[in-house]
Amino acid sequence: MASTDLKTTEDAGSVEAGLDALESGPSGRPPLRHTLVNKVLPPVVAVVVVLLVWQGLISLRIVTDPTTLPSPAAVWHTVQDAWLQGTLLGYIWTSVSRGLLGFLFALLIGTPLGLVVARVKFVRAAVGPILSGLQSLPSVAWVPPAVIWLGLDNSMMYAVILLGAVPSIANGLVSGVDQVPPLFLRAGRTMGATGLKGTWHITLPAALPGYVAGLKQGWAFAWRSLMAAEIIASFPDLGVGLGQLLENGRNASDMAMVFEAILLILTVGIAIDLLIFSPLERWVLRSRGLLVKG
Amino acid sequence: MATTLAQADPAVDHAARLDHVSKSFAGPGGAQLVLDDISLDVAPGEFVTLLGASGCGKSTLLNLVAGLDRPTTGTITTDGRPALMFQEHALFPWLTAGKNIELALKLRGVAKPDRRGRAEELLELVRLKGAHGKRVHELSGGMRQRVALARALAQESNLLLMDEPFAALDAITRDVLHDELTRIWQETGLSVLFVTHNVREAVRLAQRVVLLSSRPGRIAREWRVGIPQPRRIEDAPVAELSAEITDVLRGEIRRHGQH
């Protein structure tokens, strides 16, 4: 190469390095204080407001009958007692272990089902509408037949969870696959990713955001279905979960216990979402640059 | 050179041969002829640009050569599966820049321990050393196209097809990438079939410019570009030939307004 050639290519290299530096924005996570003020503070304020209104209803004697509305302190004492007697974690664990195990089964069934519905035209035409329809059917409707078919035991609970969660998971995967940009499939094909290789290397990872959204919704449906099953089919031999706790409170006309159960059901549902599904979703979106920094 | 990717094989006298290729698509008024009797050879190591206005079937032609679609009549032979680069970078956003390249290597059957090193080499070739762990969305448009180029090169095909790969970039970046592509083409000895509607770009890059007419796409004329590399897009000989080609191109387009 002549010396002039060399000079041009060197120039191109340094110009390119300059362009790269100019066009790449700064990256990094927002500082902790930001996260606290923007993400943590608002929900805390909301909870405090609800507690204040609740206490106000009682302090201002708007509601006077404790069997209609117990005070926050009374509910807190009930929770505390259950904790001191060592039964609180038992209630929670009975329900959470059922919920998560049922969800795991739903995952194992819903994933291949969603994939087949997304990829096989005949199956899609046959099963697709039913799958969407099942999503709008409240899973509590399945409790009576499940009790009759399977009896009052844990398998009935799992059946109801499956019917609640499988359609969400499968539908999430189907819409994820539908939204894969055709360009990715073309690019994959020119690289030799066809058939099963294409599904594994291109279609499935590209469909991940839709799939994770389906998982998140699937968990919400699984938890709801389980609570419905526990409330309706409460039977001492099954062990006391949060749904049974609520039903026991109702039978004993113990409103503080009913509130305790409702709050625990809500807290566990939110906690599982915050600990497992939201981080999973954020990770998937952030790694693809789909999460707008706020 | 250490970075040589594909040596021109003297036993094969063409990297791609299109023999009387026609393509029609079913349209509302019967079959619509998009490409009409295209015959074209790309020699090993040759850089050819296909130039044409909209409706000349440039992208259809590349799809046929890439094997993504079949010609209605005629035959296309290529030496193995060509690599294809698109106007959009088409990088997979769930993988890092380096892993995108490694996926191409994996699909080609490169053993796992060799992939990482090969990907680093290819990134260095497109001057993106150290970008292996970068996410696609962290890269600028020009950097993405260079990673896409590295990924295409990872296929170790003798023929690289490029479908207006720089059309979406700003002029400054495009200019730099022209220099890069010329350098990489010279270093690797690849054959390139490059589609564009930008006359100057075609002349800046190619050894041969093939002008396609529109509706249906036919080969209207060819020019051999004898201007020595490195060229610049503002060089006088480049401008001169571009003016000549533009006149012919306008004549082709004008015919469509007359009937």
Image (tube, coloured by chain):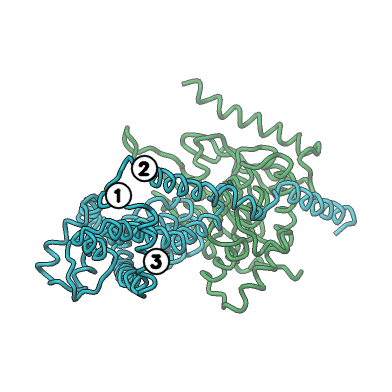
Q: Chain of mark 1?
A: A
At horizontal 75% and vertical 71% (from top left) the residue drawn is: B2
SS assignment at label 2: helix
For residue A83, say whether it is visible.
Answer: yes
Quadrant in the rendering for residue A104:
bottom left
Could you say where residue B149 lies in the image, as x and y percent from the top left? 63, 57
Q: Colour of chain A?
A: cyan
- Judging by the rendered image, the residue that carries numbered circle 1 is A69
The answer to whether the residue labelled 1 contacts the one labelled 3, judged by CB atoms less than 8 Å apart, is no
* In this rendering, position of residue A110 left or right of residue A208: left
Circle on res. A80: 3
The answer to whether the residue labelled 2 contacts the one labelled 1, judged by CB atoms less than 8 Å apart, is yes
- Judging by the rendered image, the residue that carries numbered circle 2 is A57
> Which of the chains is green?
B
Q: Earlier in the sequence, mark 2 or mark 3?
A: 2
Q: Is residue B237 depicted above or below B64 in this figure?
A: above
Could you say where residue A5 lies in the image, as x and y percent from the top left? 85, 54
Per the model, the C-alpha gap separating discs 2 and 3 is 23 Å
Q: Chain of mark 2?
A: A
The answer to whether the residue labelled 2 contacts the one labelled 3, judged by CB atoms less than 8 Å apart, is no
Extreme residue toward the left, this view: A148
Of A74 and A225, which appears nearest the observer? A74
Q: Earlier in the sequence, mark 1 or mark 3?
A: 1
